[in-house]
Image (spheres, rainbow, N blue to C red):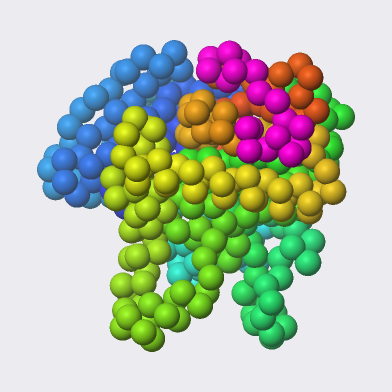
Amino acid sequence: MKNAILVLNSGSSSIKFGLYDGDDASLPIIGYGQVEGIGTAPRIRAFDRGNTQVVNTSLDAGCDHAAAMLALVEWGRTREASKHVAAVGHRVVHGGGLYDAPTLVSDKVLDRLDTLNPLAPLHQPHNLAGIRILAELMPELPQIACFDTAFHSTLPTVARQFGLPLHLYQRGIRRYGFHGLSYEYMAATLPGIIGEKAAAGNVIVAHLGNGASMCAMRDGCSVATTMGFTALDGLPMGSRCGDLDPGIVLYLQNELGMSSEEVFQLLYYQSGLLGMSGISSDMRELLNSDSDSAREAIDFYVYRINCELGALTAALGGLDALVFTAGIGEHAAPIRRRVCELASWAQIKLDERANERHALRISASDSRVPVWVVPTREEWMIARHTRELIASSGDSH
């Protein structure tokens, strides 16, 4: 019987999914989509490998995550009659110091991952809930957890540390980094795009989406990154604050009387582009707005990217290539243009026409540092890990 790999990314009200042909090492996609509106107006939308919509169906109003999971696995089983779902790969945001490689899920693994929920409260609990639900529904189905932090296990000690007492570092308060599945895909695919020599050099990838971070890579390995202990650090994001003087948190609590929950809500849900603009967390809306606050939020966003670009270049000792990826990085030409203009210190020169048409290479021919736009494929990376781990374990499901 032929095998398919189902990839799931479980959120609070949606489940993104992809189905891949596990019998082909290149893992061509069979279909993809998401269940959205769980808990309110649930609907499953699915597309085939040619991007044609094949499912757009409302689910029962009372549909919860468990029912959504059943609908997804059933869709996976019937998408192609000759295939069955052999295993499920899950995106799990935080592996902490516990897991630095894809892992076959067990009750013990889940219990250990629960301890990391406070470090990624927007994602981790939902990631794990999806795994638990599927384990109850189909306990015979192998499930693989793939971690966004794992790629950054190569960070040197000096890049992991904070200026805190050593015993706190030893207890796990350190820089972990995130978006690792995206960066890992870049490390795997860039040699074929920019050349093996360039990809092995000093490369900075800017993963700019609703969540945003940047990673400095040498020889395809992470040597520095902007996100730290939690996914709040580094660049400003859709609704997250990014880099922040920790004294501000003390001031909010001690002087303004905010509770820890109020501070949590502020930093995770009310800050970033949304908080600064007072309009939206969506960069598309901000770029189309003539509001001063929208302009100032964008100015700050681009300024911080430039600052982090400089810091990461210093960590690498030079810069051989800059790569944009993720939603904003792949589709927001004005943001790429402004970042490159500010980065003239690196002798980056933009090809305006190439940038506007979202070409693969958007730098001018005489730019000292080539600049690229490469779509990320985190789900494909999860599918590859899942296929490899199942094969190595000799699982014949």
Say which quarter of the image contains residue 154: bottom right
- Is residue 167 shown above or below 116? below
- Where residue 377 sits: x, y (%)? 56, 32
Which of 31/326 is in front?
Answer: 326
Which x, y percent locates residue 366? 79, 19
* 36 in the magenta segment: no
The vertical placement of 62 against 49, above or below, is below
Dividing the picture into quadrants, the one containing residue 367 is: top right
Query: Is residue 172 toward the left or the right of residue 4 in the image?
Result: right
Place of residue 74 in the rendered image (x, y in percent of width and height, measured from the top left): 33, 33
The residue positioned farthest toward the left in the image shown: 61
Task: Farthest residue to the front: give it.
Answer: 292
Classify 350 as above or below 14: above
Give the residue drawn at x 53%, y 70%: 245
285 left or right of 358? left
What type of secondary structure mainly makes up the magenta span?
A: helix
Numbered-mark total: 0
Pinpoint residue 47: horizontal percent, then vertical percent.
Answer: 37, 21
Judge whether residue 250 can be spotted in this image: yes
Q: Which of the two residues, 308 or 117, is positioned nearer the viewer here? A: 308
Numbered range of the magenta stretch: 340-357
Q: Residue at x 32, y 74 (%)?
A: 261
Instruction: Out of 215 and 52, give the one closest to the viewer.
Output: 215
Give the quarter of the image for residue 22. Answer: top right
The residue drawn where x is 49% and y is 52% is 236
* 132 lies left or right of 102: left
Q: Residue at x 37, y 53 (%)?
A: 276
